Image (tube, rainbow, N blue to C red):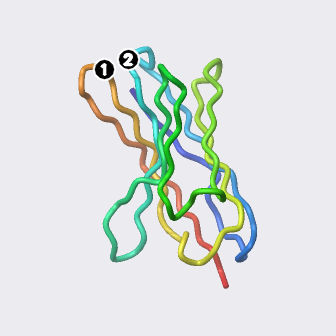
Amino acid sequence: VQLVESGGGLVQAGGSLRLSCAASGSTFSINIMGWYRQAPGKQRELVGHIISGSGRINYADSVKGRFTISGDYAKNTMYLQMNSLNPEDTAVYFCNARGTSGMEYWGKGTLVTVSS
């Protein structure tokens, strides 16, 4: 499985961005897809993920009410709509996929910078 993120960039505080994650390869094996982020000097943290079987979506408390994960299964693409961005959201955002076999896949990341 290959994952490619896009949509990052520079935005002012209070603004919005939408990230995309395009998946290719053995996508039929994926049962969870999610977004993680890593801010400078900090550990990578979960932003949220979607469980493909149930469609259930879970979010980190820090982004609840501001970020929305969605998916277009026909396009094998997952989205992260980010609203009300603040400087603390500045990070490299990574797409992650987990397969039924336990395999885990990562994209290379896309940088989001929020200026105050």
Q: For the point 56% across and 33% down, which residue is it?
A: 22
Residue at disc 1, secondary structure: loop
On residue 41, the disc is none
Q: Are marks 1 and 2 in contact (CB under 8 Å)?
A: yes
Above or below, 50 relative to 46: above
Circle 2 residues within 10 Å: few <14, some 14–19, many ≥20: some
Assign the N terminus to one quadrant of the image: top left
* Figure quadrant of residue 96: top left
Task: Tell me the residue that label 1 is attached to.
Answer: 100
State the separation of the CA atoms marked 1 and 2.
6 Å
Crowd tier of the residue under label 1, counting other residues whose Cα lies within 10 Å: few below 14, some 14–19, many 20 or above: few
Q: Nearer the viewer, residue 7 or 114?
A: 114
Residue found farthest to the left: 102
92 left or right, relative to 14: left
Residue 94 percent location from the top left of the image: 45, 51
Residue under circle 2?
29
In the image, is 36 to the left or to the right of 57?
left
**Residue type for callout 2:** Ser
Q: Quadrant of residue 26?
A: top left
Q: Which residue is painted at 65% across and 18% down in the image?
A: 74
Q: Position of residue 17 (x, y in %)?
A: 70, 57
